[in-house]
Image (cartoon, rainbow, N blue to C red):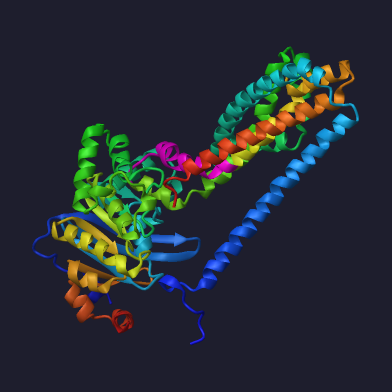
């Protein structure tokens, strides 16, 4: 098992390590959800995390930007290391460190979580102006650029309620990009979408991946993982069981549990 | 095929017949509804007139004075409402705070105010506080007591409203690096306000009516004036009915604006 979980050499186009998570453990009450996860992600790498529901993949993602405080371990993103500190989780210094981590790693949610009381443009300029302190006209220019990138510039003055699910998720991506983060974290970004709307979101994400956006994606879209991933990580019972290039993990998995999982999925 | 015979444009004629019947039923319902209002109110006025309690001269002379009290009623309500809303937002944030002191103070405030009668609170401010050297004129005391009282009820409304904002909203804002206060001010509160507007509107209507209680401490608002001139001229029936009608009118007018506001705020929802 340890053998199949060893780190693989990164694909040639990626850069140096930008995310280093070590020994991440997470308990919810007495429930041991993450049992010591190490994960390295390189600049310009697209990592897809797969696994059964309950395997801890979403929790891992949320631990990376401290939406869940890990019980043990540390996360280093782009030179900023934050140690899990569940006892002082609310302290001002720790919260500020977490905020800095979040500025580096933007999170995308299953349920989009656009701000319903702001227009599309308002969603995109809110944090750049109030958090990064960018001037209004610059924030608007930046927002228009990212909205154009996800193909929704013409929706800039609409409220989220008037958008389809797929459009909402693309706006959420644009909103995240406006913070110019070092990497994007996607938590099952298409799970809440009607089947016919999944494609447009995956296309946007695939484009980002090909442009060299660093991303970690928790997903059930095996086809997408095969197409867009530089590396696939298979998680089971709170551990990384196997990882490697998509063709290896998805076509020729070493571990029996990975095989069982994929059989069920590919049978569908 | 046993389906209904098709008429022009392929639409079965039975559907047209159903439309006509439905429209007729709806019209009949509305006619009944309006008729019963007119009839009952007319009956009341007729009864007053027959029993000699409809003194138009007296109404012409004293009506405007009573109506003038509505201005004070509105003044009391508007200022109290501003005070109550401010207290309620602060109270709700304090109640939900992780700080035990803040949460405790807010909890005590809500419990104490909701557990004692409004009239007692009005007396407390106007009659009891002077014993410790705080002497307030009736108007100020009334506004203070009303605002303080409604602030407590509205604290609970705002607390529920804040909790009703989906957790993902907060997480999304935090993921964008927004600090806690900014998340509250820019993301959570604006959505909470939309959620609570119907409840706040109801409270405002209730306050318009409860403001009559400040007549007991000599604030010359609607009820105070009606009672004063009514008892003086032995016209209490008319005077009180006029006051009641004005309260009723005020709540109808306010409800109308509230409905429009709600419709406007619904823009962008869901």
Q: Residue at x 22, y 76 (%)?
A: A249
| The C terminus of chain A - image quarter | bottom left
At x 52% / y 67%, what residue is drawn?
B16
Q: Is residue A48 left or right of residue B52?
A: left
Residue at x 70%, y 25% (from the top left corner):
B145
Q: Quadrant of the N terminus of chain A?
A: bottom left
> In this view of the protein, can residue A93 be seen by the observer?
yes
Give the image quarter of residue A217.
bottom left
Residue farthest to the front, as pictured? B8
x, y percentage for residue A62? 36, 56
Q: Is residue B105 or residue B257 the one in the foreground?
A: B257
Q: Pinpoint residue A101: horizontal percent, then vertical percent.
A: 30, 47
Disc tally is 0
Answer above or below: position of A239 versus A183: below
Residue B258 among magenta residues: no
| Predominant SS of the magenta segment | helix
Q: Which quarter of the picture shows residue A57?
A: bottom left
Q: Residue furthest bottom?
A: B1
Between A134 and A251, the one lying in front of the other is A134
The magenta-colored residue range is B176-198
- Image point 24% across, 48% down: which residue? A154
Q: Nearer the viewer, residue A131 or A85?
A: A131
| Residue A73 visible in the snapshot | no
On screen, residue B177 above or below B53: below
Give the vertical position of A267 relative to A194 (above or below): below
Q: Decide: is A204 above or below B252.
A: below
Q: Residue lying furthest left in this view?
A: A12
């Amino acid at each position: 098992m340890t053998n199949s979980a060893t780190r693989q050499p990164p694909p040639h186009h990626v850069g140096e390590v930008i995310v280093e998570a070590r020994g991440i453990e997470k308990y919810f009450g007495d429930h041991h959800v993450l049992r010591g996860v190490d994960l390295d992600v390189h600049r310009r790498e697209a990592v897809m995390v797969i696994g059964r529901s309950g395997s801890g993949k979403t929790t891992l993602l949320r631990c990376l930007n401290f939406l869940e405080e890990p019980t043990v371990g540390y996360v280093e993103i782009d030179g900023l290391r934050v140690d899990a500190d569940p006892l002082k989780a609310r302290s001002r210094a720790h919260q500020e460190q977490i905020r800095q981590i979040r500025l580096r790693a933007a999170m995308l949610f299953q349920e989009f979580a656009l701000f319903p009381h702001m227009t599309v443009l308002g969603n995109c300029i809110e944090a750049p102006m109030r958090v990064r302190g960018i001037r209004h006209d610059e924030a608007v220019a930046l927002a228009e650029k990212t909205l154009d990138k996800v193909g929704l510039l013409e929706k800039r003055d609409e409220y989220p309620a008037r958008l389809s699910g797929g459009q909402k998720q693309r706006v959420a991506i644009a909103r995240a990009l406006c913070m110019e983060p070092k990497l994007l974290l996607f938590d099952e970004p298409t799970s809440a979408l009607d089947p016919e709307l999944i494609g447009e979101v995956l296309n946007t994400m695939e484009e980002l991946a090909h442009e060299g956006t660093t991303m970690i994606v928790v997903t059930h879209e095996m086809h997408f993982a095969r197409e867009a991933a530089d590396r696939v990580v298979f998680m089971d019972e709170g551990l990384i069981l196997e990882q490697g290039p998509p063709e290896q993990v998805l076509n020729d998995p070493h571990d029996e549990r990975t095989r069982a999982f994929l059989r069920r999925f590919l049978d569908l | 095929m046993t389906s209904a015979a098709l008429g022009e444009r392929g639409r079965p004629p039975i559907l047209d017949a159903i439309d006509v019947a439905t429209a007729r039923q709806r019209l009949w319902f509305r006619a009944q509804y309006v008729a019963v209002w007119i009839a009952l109110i007319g009956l009341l006025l007729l009864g007053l007139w027959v029993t000699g309690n409809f003194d138009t001269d007296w109404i012409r002379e004293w009506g405007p004075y009573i109506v003038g009290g509505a201005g004070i009623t509105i003044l009391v309500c508007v200022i109290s409402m501003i005070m109550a809303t401010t207290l309620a937002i602060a109270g709700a944030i304090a109640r939900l705070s992780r700080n035990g002191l803040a949460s405790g103070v807010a909890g005590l405030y809500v419990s104490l105010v909701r557990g004692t009668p409004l009239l007692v609170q009005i007396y407390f401010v106007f009659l009891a506080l002077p014993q410790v050297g705080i002497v307030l004129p009736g108007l100020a005391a009334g506004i203070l007591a009303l605002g303080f009282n409604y602030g407590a009820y509205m604290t609970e409304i705002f607390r529920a409203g804040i909790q009703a904002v989906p957790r993902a909203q907060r997480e999304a804002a935090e993921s964008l690096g927004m600090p806690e206060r900014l998340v509250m001010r820019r993301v959570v509160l604006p959505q909470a306000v939309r959620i609570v507007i119907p409840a706040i509107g109801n409270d405002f209507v209730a306050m318009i009516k409860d403001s009559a209680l400040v007549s007991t401490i000599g604030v010359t608002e609607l009820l105070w004036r009606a009672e004063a001139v009514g008892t003086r001229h032995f016209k209490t029936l008319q005077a009180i009915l006029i006051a009641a009608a004005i309260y009723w009118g005020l709540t109808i007018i306010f409800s109308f604006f509230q409905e429009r506001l709600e419709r406007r705020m619904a823009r962008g929802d869901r």
